[in-house]
Image (cartoon, rainbow, N blue to C red):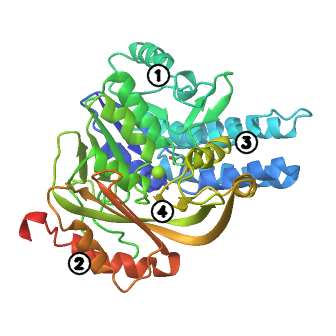
């Protein structure tokens, strides 16, 4: 069985949803995982924020706008007035339920999550109805009936596998099974989600739970490119990647794939295929455990990076210093991306600054701290083996005109990461295009 996940732009309009009915194969069993229509989750986030600020009328007004958008989609999506009515009625019920919660005297504590769930609940309901109108057999199974996270917010794979397989057994004979990405229940059984962009993760978890033979992630670009097409012209799609390379690219900015997607698929050796809804015949990018390449494959970047330089007050040879530093970040649940060390100081980067004041206060108890903002990580990905020299010099030579804040090389054999000021990001990406586009392998030196 295959899992096919379609992102927000792939279900972004009536025309796009209709297009999916052609892309989804009806002759083989598939699970179709959908995101919310493009832009909808952002609006729902805004509405939930208004609820939190007790601006209830504004929150309700915004929910009504989102409801209207879905109802207008019904007018275009369905051919018959019967289905237009059915679609609008489904949407009305879902939004009314949420609005009632918002207006209730005791607003549920997880109201934000309840509101965010509307996006995926709506898109899947419309797609299911669209197939029904076209008389294509399909079933809609509720993600809230099987997708679950435990108290550490990790997927509860045992529960998911059991519940999902039970739901699938009840649908035997039906080839197209539709479900929601992103949404789940938490350990208390309340509606929750897998965090922004989490539909890819849903697809990977489902793939793992059913031992899928492929997980397809459909977006609006022909797979991973070897550089960022938003900043560099002449980039080209990469046809094959290893899980390691894809994990680095996904983490460091190539927005196509949510980084959490890799692990559940790699664990079961399930290939991940990245495909373009707008160009379905393009082969896209295939990510497998067997692929082994050589040299520099791709460049990506991640913005909004904060660098923190931490200098030990005791200076030389202080043991236990790193432990104290990392304990601070662990206590504040803040992930560290890059690290470089010298004898007396370390510099590291984070992208989540929500606990930064607490972090710097704690660090200042035993060190001096400098914080600088507005950096980008430039990430060069490939298969770099120590026995074959030359990669680092190719990279540094290409960007020799750009001031570098930090270099991290050797952490894995798949990544060189360089910190630059965000004002130099595009120049760095463009300069590195000369290194990737020719796919120079180390043997050529
Ligand atoms: N709709 C959710 C979001 O926008 C999940 C997703 O699209 O992956 O974050
Ligand atoms: Mg996405």
- Which residue sits at x=76%, y=38%? 111
Residue 360 lies, with reference to residue 130, above or below; the image says below
Cα–Cα span, label 4 and label 1: 42 Å
From the viewer's perspective, tell me whether residue 293 is left or right of residue 349: left
Circle 1 crowding by C-alpha within 10 Å: few under 14, some 14–19, many from 20: some
Q: Position of residue 340 (x, y in %)?
A: 46, 60
The tag on residue 434 is: 2
The answer to whether any part of residue 235 appears in the image is no
Mark 3: is the Cβ under 8 angstroms from ligand 1? no
The residue tagged 3 is 112
**Which of label 2 and label 1 is nearer to you?**
2
* SS at circle 2: helix
Quarter of the image holding residue 211?
A: top left
* Total numbered badges shown on the rendered structure: 4
Quarter in which the C terminus is drawn: bottom left
Quarter of the image holding residue 92?
A: top right
Cα–Cα span, label 2 and label 1: 44 Å
The answer to whether any part of residue 275 appears in the image is yes
Cα–Cα span, label 3 and label 1: 25 Å
* SS at circle 1: helix
Foreground residue among 196 and 268: 268
* SS at circle 3: helix
Cα–Cα span, label 3 and label 4: 44 Å
The tag on residue 383 is: none
Cα–Cα span, label 2 and label 3: 46 Å
The tag on residue 157 is: 1
């Amino acid at each position: 069985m295959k899992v096919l996940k379609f992102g927000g732009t792939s279900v972004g309009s009536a025309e796009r949803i209709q297009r999916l009915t052609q892309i989804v194969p009806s002759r083989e069993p598939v699970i179709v995982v959908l995101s919310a229509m493009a832009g909808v989750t952002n609006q729902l986030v805004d509405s939930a924020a208004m609820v939190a600020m007790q601006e209830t009328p504004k929150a309700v007004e915004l929910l009504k706008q989102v409801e209207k958008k879905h109802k207008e989609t019904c007018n275009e999506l369905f051919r018959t007035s019967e289905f237009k009515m059915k679609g609008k009625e489904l949407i009305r019920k879902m939004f009314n339920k949420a609005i009632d919660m918002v207006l209730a005297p005791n607003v549920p504590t997880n109201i934000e999550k309840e509101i965010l769930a509307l996006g995926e609940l709506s898109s899947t309901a419309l797609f299911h109805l669209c197939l029904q109108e076209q008389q294509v057999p399909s079933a809609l199974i509720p993600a809230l009936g099987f997708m679950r996270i435990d108290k550490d917010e990790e997927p509860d794979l045992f529960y998911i596998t059991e519940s999902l397989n039970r739901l699938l057994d009840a649908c035997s004979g039906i080839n197209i099974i539709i479900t929601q990405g992103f949404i789940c229940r938490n350990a208390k059984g309340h509606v929750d989600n897998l965090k922004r962009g989490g539909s890819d993760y849903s697809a990977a978890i489902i793939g793992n739970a059913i031992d899928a033979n492929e997980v397809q992630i459909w977006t609006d670009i022909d797979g991973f490119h070897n550089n960022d097409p938003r900043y560099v012209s002449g980039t080209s799609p990469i046809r094959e990647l290893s899980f390691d390379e894809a994990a680095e690219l996904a983490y460091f900015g190539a927005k196509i794939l949510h980084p959490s997607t890799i692990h559940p698929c790699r664990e079961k050796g399930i290939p991940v295929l990245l495909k373009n809804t707008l160009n379905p015949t393009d082969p896209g990018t295939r990510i497998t455990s067997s692929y082994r390449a050589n040299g520099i494959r791709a460049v990506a970047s991640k913005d909004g990076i904060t660098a923190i330089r931490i200098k030990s007050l005791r200076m030389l040879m202080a043991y236990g210093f790193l432990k104290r530093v990392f304990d601070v970040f662990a206590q504040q649940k803040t992930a560290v991306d890059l690290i470089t060390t010298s004898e007396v100081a370390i510099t590291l980067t984070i992208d989540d600054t929500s606990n930064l004041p607490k972090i710097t206060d704690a660090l200042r108890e035993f060190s001096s701290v400098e914080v600088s903002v507005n950096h980008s990580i430039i990430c060069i990905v490939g298969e770099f083996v120590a026995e074959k020299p030359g990669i680092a010099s190719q990279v540094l030579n290409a960007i020799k005109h750009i001031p570098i804040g930090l270099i991290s090389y050797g952490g894995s054999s798949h990544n060189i990461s360089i910190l630059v000021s965000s004002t130099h990001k595009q120049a760095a990406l463009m300069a590195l295009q000369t290194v990737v586009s020719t796919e120079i392998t180390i043997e050529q030196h």
